[in-house]
Image: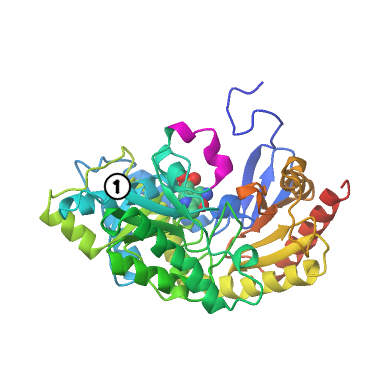
Amino acid sequence: MTHLLHRSIHGRLPVAVGGKGIHLFDADGKSYIDASGGAAVSCLGHNHPEVQAALHAQLDRLAYAHTSFFTTQVAEELADRLIADAPAALEHVYLVSGGSEAVEAALKMARQYFVEKGEPQRRHIIARRQSYHGNTLGVLATGGNEWRRARFLPLLIETHHIAPCFAYRGQREGESDGDYARRAAGELEAKILELGADQVMAFVAETVVGATAGAVPPVADYFRHIRRICDKYGVLLILDEVMCGMGRTGTLHACEQDGIAPDLMTIAKGLGGGYQPVGAVLLSGRIFEAFAQGSGYFQHGHTYAGHPMAAAASLAVQTILKRDGLLDNVRTMGDALHAGLVQRFADHPHVGDIRGRGLFRAVELVQDRSSKTPFDAGLKLHARIKKEAMARGLMVYPMGGTIDGQNGDHVLIAPPFIVAQTDIAAIVERLGDAVDAALVSF
Ligand code: PMP
């Protein structure tokens, strides 16, 4: 019996002992293609020698200094780099240790902003169903994944949820993208008016939805409408790009493709590529100014905020991504992955949708394609696919179809940005075999 508590108490996991590029190795000597980057984390692949060297160098200099006493050069440099490449409205960086911490901090920034501005009545958070913003209590309340929330409901702060922009499930027969974008965004305006326009603090959304619904991009213009509605009512827009950001969709920030910038943006996974736990909030100048002219500080803090090792890993990863032009590869290989998935699954009787952007793709599995009826959640198709994929030396990220009792199981595919055409072919082939093997017993 292990003393280490993993998420699942039952079942034996392979022991990871090494990695190289897009591969991970277990203690039995088996090799896995990491086609999910863990959970869309490992953007540079594993054991990159230059990131390892940067970490060794930082460790030799200094591992830790608390931010209430010191700043460090490496954290300052990282912040400069992030802002140089961010949308113009975003001017400052707050470093934390992961995605949940980043979204928690962004929510508290939004709240403090309105307190500083003399609008303390603004307290409502609006988010979307079928979204995920993390597992700590504040952001679990924000997320709209019913399954993840259910057990903890009595502990969760009140949050208001509207429908996501999810073309496969939400767009009506014959409805144009433009009309759907307006209708889906219109839910935000209706909710703001219902709650009272001067009572709403922030709208939170993943630019491209990750863990809960599986690489769901918005339709064109959805976020332009959202931005306009937020501006109209003075509501802050928080985009959670913890999973879809930092190059995953083919641009550094996913929202670049939607032609808007948020007031607060959260990033994490691809920021440090898994070499250290790290996350960040990028915030606009006006939020910073409200703090600067108000209480003079942001009332928050974690022991490991701005950790030098995390900053060193992030700076190295981001420097290499840029130097090696890896976003070009994300776009090219993303198209190749999409084409491969379409070729393998377009005629598959149980694949209802193939979607995503860049190297952030998903297939959604359904019992019946014409009615889009999901498989019974109790069958745990996603878990079967994961097991079959692991048996074939493939890591993908399947999730259950329990959301609002509506979605099908899906498989998220998010390989490192260094993936090559031959890897894509192997990923699609192994995934196809795993899906068919998982379905055989039904
Ligand atoms: N937001 C999004 C969009 C995420 O995908 C995740 C992690 N899957 C989180 C927040 C939480 O990040 P972490 O697990 O690092 O706390």
- The residue shown at (48%, 41%) is 135
**Disc 1 target residue:** 108
Query: Is residue 85 visible in this depiction of the protein?
Result: no
- The residue shown at (33%, 52%) is 106
Instruction: Tell which of 107 and 78 is nearer to you.
Output: 107
Q: Is residue 222 above or below residue 124?
A: below
Look at the image and give the residue range highlighted in magenta.
Answer: 145-154
What amino acid is labelled 1 in the image?
Answer: Lys
Q: Residues within 10 Å of mark 1 (few under 14, many from 20)?
A: some
The image quadrant that residue 230 belongs to is bottom left
In magenta stretch: residue 340? no
The image quadrant that residue 77 belongs to is bottom left
Tell me where residue 307 appears, x and y as whole percent.
Answer: 34, 45
Instruction: Tell which of 88 and 237 is nearer to you.
Output: 237
- Is ligand 1 less than 8 Å from the beta carbon at label 1? no
Tell me where residue 431 appears, x and y as whole percent.
Answer: 76, 57
Query: Is residue 37 visible in this depiction of the protein?
Result: yes
Tell me where residue 410 appears, x and y as whole percent.
Answer: 68, 55
Question: For the stretch drawn in magenta, what is the main secondary structure?
Answer: helix
Tell me where residue 39 appears, x and y as whole percent.
Answer: 57, 51
Number of dots carrying numbers: 1
- For mark 1, give the secondary structure: helix
Name the side, left or right, on which 202 lies relative to 223. Answer: left
Quadrant location of the N terminus?
top right
Instruction: Tell which of 75 and 267 is nearer to you.
Output: 267
Name the side, left or right, on which 146 lies relative to 305. Answer: right
Name the side, left or right, on which 28 lies relative to 406. Answer: right
Q: How is the image coloured?
A: rainbow
Instruction: Tell which of 86 and 201 is nearer to you.
Output: 201
